[in-house]
Image (tube, rainbow, N blue to C red):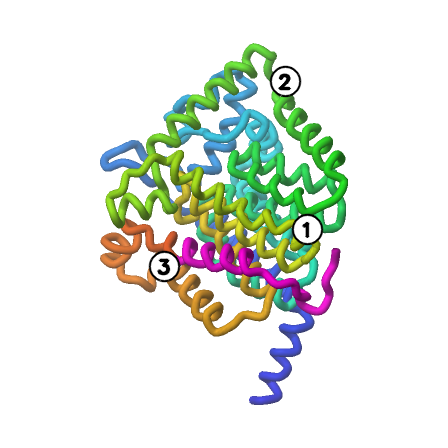
Amino acid sequence: MNLTKANLIRTWQSRSLSIVLFAYVLISVLAAVQGLTAGPKTYIPGGRPYIDYNNFRIFKFSFYHLIQGKDIYQLFPDDHWDLYKYSPGFALCFGLLSWMPDIIGLLLWNLINSLCLYAGVRLLPGISDEKKSWILLFCLLEMLLSIQNTQSNGLMAGLTVMAFALAERRNYFLSTLCVVFSFYIKIYGAAAFVLYLFYPDKLRLAGWSLFWMLFFALLPLLVVDSHQLMLLYRSWLHLLLNDRSASTGLSVMGILVSWWHLDAAKNIVTGAGIILFLLPLVYVRHYRDLHFRLLYLANLLIWMVIFNHKAESPTFVIVMAGIGIWYFSRQPDVMDKVLMILSFLLITMSVSDLVPAAVRNDFIRPYGIKAVMAIVIWCRILYEQMTFRERAVGSSVER
């Protein structure tokens, strides 16, 4: 028995990343099969039934609506439920999958989401392969939840982590591509631009960022004229402004409303969040320390969700990536271990079938319990940054 256990441990230590890669591919396949074989569902009582993988259909048809010269930010009830809320550039890029049969396109979309995060974590400097594997395993169930809903959250998390890892390697061309593309998927991806304060060659970073911003902004001109493109951007802006005023999500704002009925102005809450997020940047001398930079990456990933008015349960794969990087990039103390366990239980397991439906529906969801531990750990990270002492990370610090 001991020999078998030792062999398992050695196998894990030597092949952990390969094992996790297999797990990420497996959940991508399983989620695709589940979506393709599930029956239709309705989104309002007595409403029209729609195909189970509705979000994928929104992305898919956004491409066709774009090339047909339609306003892609209107409702198209004959094709899918709900509105398309991303950029015209992303709608065009999704055309690479839209033309494929759903059985192939859906699987590839799941793989893009899961493997982007895998690749981003794999590229992180200063963390051993085994700890990278634990980060990815920690995110696995949340990734499954996200791709079961065919959302883009795994891709958002992966692009942000990859942008950081590529900037560490001074590959600014691809790093800025990751940040800008994430912005054209969901605008809060632009928060990752703050990471570039840590690196030299600011002009190169600014130049490549501007290049990619213009590239994706003008890319739809391949299929629409300039007048139609301007109409689309105005329609997108109008949609985003109205969408912001109509929801609070699993966020700091949502907690204020559901717990204390404090309907504070969203701009005030967001402004306070931005100030706190930027506060550690006053310690310029710490920029050279990889551990400080990894802490800021973890801070960013969690911040993008807890101050996002549209955060929902599948969005928390981004949070778990941040928590995983925070925990496994350092030597945790007892308090950190407690917070890690609680975050897994209250963020990931709280919405699983292991929790009675009555508890989920009457307590977990109405009171935004998933957001609570994310906020607590974000505050912990912020405290660590504000009281930071320089130290080595792992056994191979890269700069």
Query: Quarter of the image containing the N terminus?
Result: bottom right
Percent across and percent down for residue 67 are 56, 19
The span from disc 3 to disc 2 (Cα, nearest Å) is 44 Å
Give the vertical position of 352 relative to 275 (above or below). Answer: below
The answer to the question of whether label 3 and label 1 lie on touching residues, with beta carbons closer than 8 A, is: no
* Residue 113 seen anywhere in this rendered image of the structure: yes
Foreground: disc 1 or disc 2:
1
Q: Is residue 301 left or right of residue 267?
A: right
| Range shown magenta | 373-399
Q: Nearer the viewer, residue 128 or 103?
A: 128
Where is residue 239, by image quadrant?
A: top left
At label 2, the amino acid type is: Leu
The answer to the question of whether label 1 and label 2 lie on touching residues, with beta carbons closer than 8 A, is: no
Counting other residues with Cα less than 10 Å from the Cα at mark 2, is it few (<14), some (14-19), or many (20 or more)? Answer: some
Q: Is residue 250 magenta?
A: no
- Residue at numbered disc 2: 221
Query: Quarter of the image containing the C terminus?
Result: bottom right
Counting other residues with Cα less than 10 Å from the Cα at mark 3, is it few (<14), some (14-19), or many (20 or more)? Answer: some
* Residue 110 seen anywhere in this rendered image of the structure: no
- Residue at numbered disc 1: 165
The span from disc 3 to disc 1 (Cα, nearest Å) is 32 Å
Percent across and percent down for residue 386 are 54, 56
Q: Is residue 396 magenta?
A: yes
Foreground: disc 3 or disc 1:
1
The span from disc 1 to disc 2 (Cα, nearest Å) is 32 Å
Which residue is at 48% across, 37% downward?
56
Which residue is at 63% across, 73% downward?
12
- Residue at numbered disc 3: 352
The earlier-in-sequence mark between 3 and 2 is 2
Which residue is at 40% across, 49% downward?
313
The earlier-in-sequence mark between 3 and 1 is 1
